Amino acid sequence: MIAAVLAEATVSRALKMARCSRSTFYDWMERDAVFAAELRRQRSVLYEETLHRLKGRATAAVDVLEKLLGSDEEKIRLAASRTILEAARFAHMDLDMEARIAALERSAHESGT
């Protein structure tokens, strides 16, 4: 069941593939702590592996965008520019969020909560 949930794009498709009813699956999630924990653990591992792969390809993607900025076609330059600016905005938001979380954690630690 867990393999199906991880392999399919939706829970519905996974349940169909595994020949399991929706009510049974959600019953397991609610009542079987071991099953629910293992699904969360395996999802986390898959997510971390995916992030690692994405990070490895990020440099190549930036190289492509930089080349596209030099295109003779205005639409291509504009699309590359928008993509770069959007990525920069998200990177800034991530860094800002990390700093805020760190400050909250320090504050909570210092106040003993």
Image (cartoon, grey):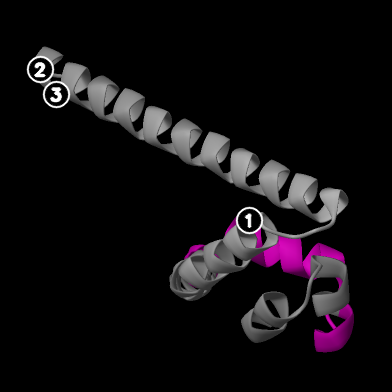
Tag 3 residue: 109
In space, the residues marked 3 and 2 are separated at their CA atoms by: 4 Å
Instruction: Report if residue 70 is visible in the image.
Output: yes
Tag 1 residue: 30
In space, the residues marked 3 and 1 are separated at their CA atoms by: 32 Å
Of callouts 3 and 1, which one flags the residue occurring earlier in the amino acid sequence?
1
Label 1's element?
A: helix
Percent of width and height locating residue 96: 39, 28
Give amino acid for label 3: His
Image height check: is 33 above or below 107? below
> Closer to the camera, 83 or 20?
83
Q: Label 1: few (<14), some or many (≥20) within 10 Å?
A: few
Tag 2 residue: 110
Give amino acid for label 2: Glu
Which residue shows up at 68% across the image and 45% down it?
81
Label 2's element?
A: helix
Of circles 2 and 1, the one toward us is: 2
